[in-house]
Image (tube, rainbow, N blue to C red):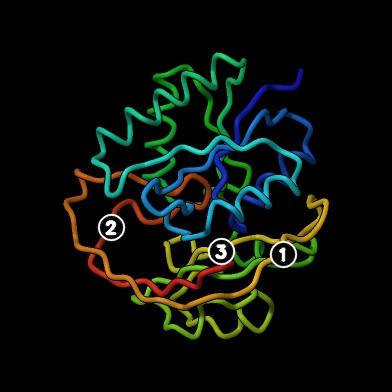
Amino acid sequence: MTQQAIFNWSGGKDSALALYKVRQSGQYHVQTLLTTVSEPYQRISMHGVRTELLDRQTASLRLPCRQLFLPEMPSMDAYERLMASTMDELKSDGATAAIFGDIFLEDLRRYREEKLAAAGWQAVFPLWGVPTAELMREFLALGFKTITTCVNEKYLDQSFVGRVIDEQFLRDLPPHVDPCGENGEFHTFVFDGPMFREPVAFEKGEIVHRRYTPAPKTDTADYDCGDAADASPFDTGFWYCDLV
């Protein structure tokens, strides 16, 4: 019997590949995507992608998307209250599984599983444990196309933001950077692939630098709904490429 599910969608490559695998398996019926959005900026959390592009992307995927709006720098308590309320609403529609694109961050998986189990949900991780280099090769071989929208300057310089990921991009990555950016090295926006009715049209806009003020880990939330990433703002800067 097909299980009703919601999919935690970031708009990035890991989300796209996980969704593809879920659809291929036939085990789950995805009722809706769920994306956390910065309310003040109207952009996907951490990825920095405008909600207008998110709308076009999910329309091309032919899936509804529930946007969970977060205030700027919410506390962990505030984040969890907003998320719990949203998940209760989604559960009332019959969904019992929540699907994520996480790959190997054990702490994040445990956090998700514990919170969801307490609310009667099952957490599902279609990409879990697969070597990230293998996942990237599969992603590209399937015909997905994605562009970097945010890079962490601790790991990568400005030249890596606003680039379409291809074999050359992967060869250019420093040895200490994960091919999927699973440690938060970079974030992406998928604009075409086997699930898309049509490519998502966009142009590259301004490249900007943002620096975040460090905050205590216990005081902040994991903002990334699909691609496992940074659990809090920390003492580093990010390069963003605006897509318009």
Amino acid marked by disc 3: Thr
* Earlier sequence position, callout 2 versus callout 3: 3
Residue located 65% across and 47% down the image:
18
Q: Quadrant of the N terminus?
A: top right
Q: Are marks 3 and 1 in contact (CB under 8 Å)?
A: no
Q: Residues within 10 Å of mark 1 (few under 14, many from 20)?
A: few
Is 192 left, or right, of 84 in this rendering? Answer: right
Can you tell which of label 3 and label 1 is closer to the viewer?
Answer: 1
Can you tell which of label 2 and label 1 is closer to the viewer?
Answer: 1
From the image, tell me which residue sits under label 3.
188
Measured in 3D between alpha carbons, the distance from the residue under mark 3 to the one under mark 1, in whole angstroms, is: 15 Å
Q: Secondary structure at mark 1?
A: loop
* Earlier sequence position, callout 2 versus callout 1: 1
* Earlier sequence position, callout 3 versus callout 1: 3
Which disc, if any, is residue 233? Answer: 2
Residue located 55% across and 31% down the image:
98
Q: Are marks 2 and 1 in contact (CB under 8 Å)?
A: no
Is 140 left, or right, of 130 in this rendering? Answer: right
Residue located 27% across and 49% down the image:
73
Is 61 left, or right, of 7 in this rendering? Answer: right
From the image, tell me which residue sits under label 1.
201
**Where's residue 182, x and y in %?**
48, 60
Q: Secondary structure at mark 2?
A: loop
Q: Quadrant of the C terminus?
A: bottom right
**Where's residue 160, x and y in %?**
51, 80
Quadrant housing residue 183: bottom left
**Where's residue 122, x and y in %?**
53, 25
